[in-house]
Image (spheres, rainbow, N blue to C red):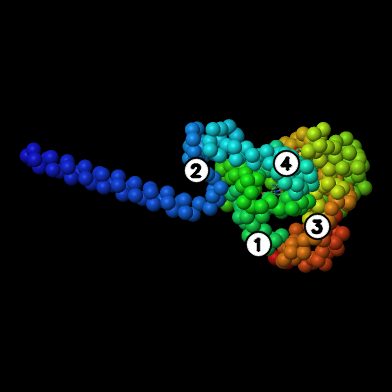
């Protein structure tokens, strides 16, 4: 091989190499464009600006934490992972809206006065991060999703407004508002380590076995007076903080509590919530109530007076109503009383047999 030949083959080789690089770059760019076009979940997230790590750097940190995580239970991401990012202030505002909702949206709210004085955090503990404390670990990964209650596919916005209108007995937030966008940004942050379509273990509530008998409100009242009234008061009306803009101990019934269309008004949700979270300090690892006590408390508290909400559009397919939905009509012949207080096993079994 003479020198000039060698030179030209090297030249050719270089050309092939740069062509390969070019093709890779073009593919990467096209992929990037496709991802941007179909990226509907993150539309609220602004382009990174200023100093500090960029959004992609933040996500990289977040992903790294996820791949290192090996336990099955959801682990909420540390808020430090967004320090300095362009999203930080929006996500932190979202978190504050969850923890201190009433200061912004309550009866004396600084932004709008559209809710009853409860904070989202009262029921979604530790700003929605507590394991089996009704946390938000699976919100970003599972919404939008079809829900039988409305018979439609629901967005995160609809789900947030559902709790505002029912659990906070109020009115909906404008979906374009800074508040709704911040809450959504916070949920997306919390769900960053959960694969799309997955309900991560530890989110929502822990399952609770049905009793063989119906739940007993009279027994629930006795337990309430022993274990709950010191904070929530014998009247059930809770205790306002000195600042008067949120509760130290939220109300469990009465005019300032959740209404009768709320999730907690179902006995199973209430019993599951208190079993792993109340009295304050209880956890799923260290519950302080027996199953019977949790169900009886639910029966007592949910038989006390509270605001009523008309929801004629709920459960368009009545055969899909939860077995403990306390109002008829039903697609089976069990009484309204049994659907409210149990025993629930026969209803669950009858439904299974029908399938
Ligand atoms: C009085 C208690 C209560 C309060 C206060 C409350 N929620 Fe909820 N929330 C629930 C219950 C109970 C559920 C689960 C209901 C079910 O699955 O039937 C729920 C579910 C949700 C979900 C769906 C979670 C999932 O994984 O599917 C979102 C999102 C949500 N709430 C947002 C909010 C927001 C935002 C606020 C404050 C504006 C709020 N909630 C206040 C009781 C409450
Ligand atoms: C030491 C005080 C304390 C005791 C005792 C206590 N709670 Fe609570 N409870 C709280 C606080 C505080 C919150 C709100 C938590 C938050 O915002 O982080 C809460 C929230 C709740 C909620 C959701 C919010 C609402 O207003 O509906 C329910 C339901 C509840 N408690 C039921 C009970 C029951 C039932 C008992 C008795 C087994 C009980 N609690 C005992 C302090 C207490």
- Which is nearer the N-term, disc 4 or disc 1? 4
For residue 47, the mark is 2
Question: Marks 3 and 2: CB-CB under 8 Å?
Answer: no
- Between 111 and 293, the one lying in front of the other is 111
| Picture quadrant of ligand 2 | top right
Foreground label between 4 and 3: 4
Query: Which of the 4 image quadrants contains residue 110?
Result: top right
For residue 110, the mark is 4
Question: What residue sits right under mark 1 in the picture?
Answer: 152
Helix, strand or loop status at disc 2? loop
* Residue 265 spot, x, y in % from top left: 80, 52
Q: In which quadrant will I find the C terminus? A: bottom right
Foreground label between 4 and 1: 4
Foreground label between 2 and 1: 2
Foreground label between 3 and 1: 3
How far apart in space, not on screen, are marks 2 and 1 (Cα)? 32 Å
* Residue 224 spot, x, y in % from top left: 88, 41
Q: Is mark 1 within 8 Å of ligand 1?
A: no
For residue 309, the mark is 3
């Amino acid at each position: 091989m003479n020198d000039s030949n060698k030179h030209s083959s090297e030249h050719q080789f270089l050309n092939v190499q740069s062509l390969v690089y070019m093709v890779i770059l073009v593919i990467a760019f096209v992929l990037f464009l496709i991802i941007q076009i179909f990226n509907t979940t993150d539309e609220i997230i602004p382009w990174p600006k200023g100093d500090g790590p960029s959004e992609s750097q933040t996500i990289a940190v977040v992903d790294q934490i996820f791949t290192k995580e090996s336990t099955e239970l959801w682990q909420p991401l540390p808020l430090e992972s967004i320090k300095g990012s362009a999203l930080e202030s929006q996500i932190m505002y979202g978190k504050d809206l969850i923890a201190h909702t009433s200061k912004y949206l309550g009866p004396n709210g600084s932004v709008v006065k559209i809710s009853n004085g409860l904070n989202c955090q009262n029921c979604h503990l530790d700003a929605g991060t507590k394991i089996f404390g009704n946390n938000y670990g699976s919100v970003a990964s599972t919404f939008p999703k079809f829900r039988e209650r409305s018979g439609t596919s629901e967005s995160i916005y609809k789900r947030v407004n559902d709790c505002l209108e029912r659990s906070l007995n109020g009115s909906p937030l404008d979906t374009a508002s800074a508040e709704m966008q911040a809450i959504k940004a916070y949920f997306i942050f919390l769900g960053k380590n959960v694969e799309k379509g997955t309900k991560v273990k530890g989110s929502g509530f822990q399952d609770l076995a049905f009793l063989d008998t119906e739940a007993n409100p009279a027994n629930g009242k006795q337990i309430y007076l022993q274990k709950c009234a010191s904070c929530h008061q014998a009247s059930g009306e809770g205790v306002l903080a000195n600042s008067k803009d949120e509760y130290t101990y939220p109300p469990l019934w009465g005019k300032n509590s959740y209404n009768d269309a709320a999730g907690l008004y179902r006995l199973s949700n209430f019993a599951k919530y208190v079993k792993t979270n109340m009295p304050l300090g209880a956890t799923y690892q260290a519950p302080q109530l027996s199953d019977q006590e949790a169900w009886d408390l639910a029966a007592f508290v949910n038989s006390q007076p509270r605001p009523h909400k008309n929801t004629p559009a709920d459960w368009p397919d009545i055969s899909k109503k939860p077995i403990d939905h306390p109002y008829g009509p039903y697609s089976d012949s069990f009484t309204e009383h049994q659907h409210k207080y149990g025993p629930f096993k026969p209803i669950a079994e009858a439904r299974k047999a029908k399938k």
